[in-house]
Image (cartoon, helix red, strand yellow):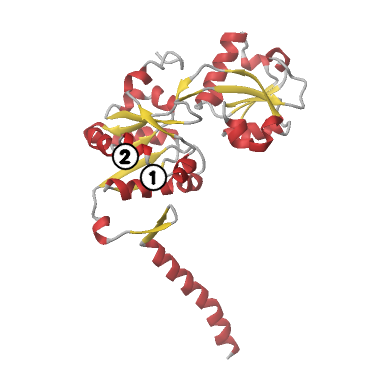
Amino acid sequence: MKKILKLLMFILPLILVCLILLYNKNNTVVQGKQYKQTTVEKDRELIRFLRMPYANSLKVMDENYNFIMYLSEKTGYKIKLNVAKSYEEVVDIAKKGDADVIWTATNHYVENIDEFGDYTPIFRPVRHGNDKYRGIIITSNKSNINEMKDLKGKVFAFTDINSTSGYILPKALLENKYSIDIYSFFSDIKYLGSHDSVIENVYYGKVDAGAVFEDAPETILKERKNGVRILDRTEYILNEPIIVKKDISEKFKKIFNKDFIKNIPEQIKEDLSVEGFVDANEKEYRNLRKVLGYK
């Protein structure tokens, strides 16, 4: 009898979990309300929405989930969110036409603009009242580093060589404004993979200085933002474009219009870390190729 009871105690929770998963499969939550996917909705036209791997896939999915569900509900399309495994994979997916909408990264799009020939930019996000951004070079407020020349022989951190504000623009600033060859000027260069890692390492003094996007102290460190000091700022560059397949761009723009953007719930904007969107076009981004060092 005791063995049977122990077996039941093990099996019942598993059954309960399975029932919950089965229920959730056909139900999602959008802005605190339940959104049920009916058979009719499952048969709607599919839009494949691809996001860059700006963080781990679980975080990207979590931050974009309500937005995708909201788009599905309001546009009449069934929108499926995918997260690319790497920046390189985004180009492969675009070449195959396996995504209908891609929320890109500025430098990656500009560098590979001809590879995205079947797509056209339609919008870019607005953050902190601006549709452009720049990088900054920071150090800890506890350090004795007050200007760029004080960094000679120090340890410097970038995010990733593909990052516009975390590598390309800061490197150009150091080279063009200060005539600094980063490989001989610093005692060590670290590539930490994310803006979060760079600013935390600077804050805790694990590296002497680093490069991040301009709003990183406020958005990442929050109440600790005064723990770092800005040494200089790079040139501005346009925020990343959302690109759409050319054969559906006009249809998509009619739905995803200014009125639609204006009415996006505040919680969803907060999830995405945006305040809204403005129109974008390919010419604007082609003009950035020289700024970013491409022919």
92 on left or right of 270? left
SS label for mark 2: loop
C-alpha span from label 1 to label 2: 9 Å
The answer to whether residue 192 is seen in the rendering is: no
Residue that numbered label 1 is attached to: 82
Question: Is disc 1 in contact with disc 2, using a CB cutoff of under 8 Å?
Answer: yes
Q: Amino acid at mark 1?
A: Asn
Residue 99's tag is 2
Rendered location of residue 140, percent (x, y)? 72, 27
Rendered location of residue 97, percent (x, y)? 28, 37
177 on left or right of 273? right
Q: Amino acid at mark 2?
A: Ala
Image point (35%, 24%), residue name:
113
Instruction: Pick the quarter of the image with the N terminus.
Output: bottom right
**In this rendering, is residue 165 above or below 287?**
below
Q: Along the line of sight, which residue is nearer the eye, 102 or 180?
A: 102
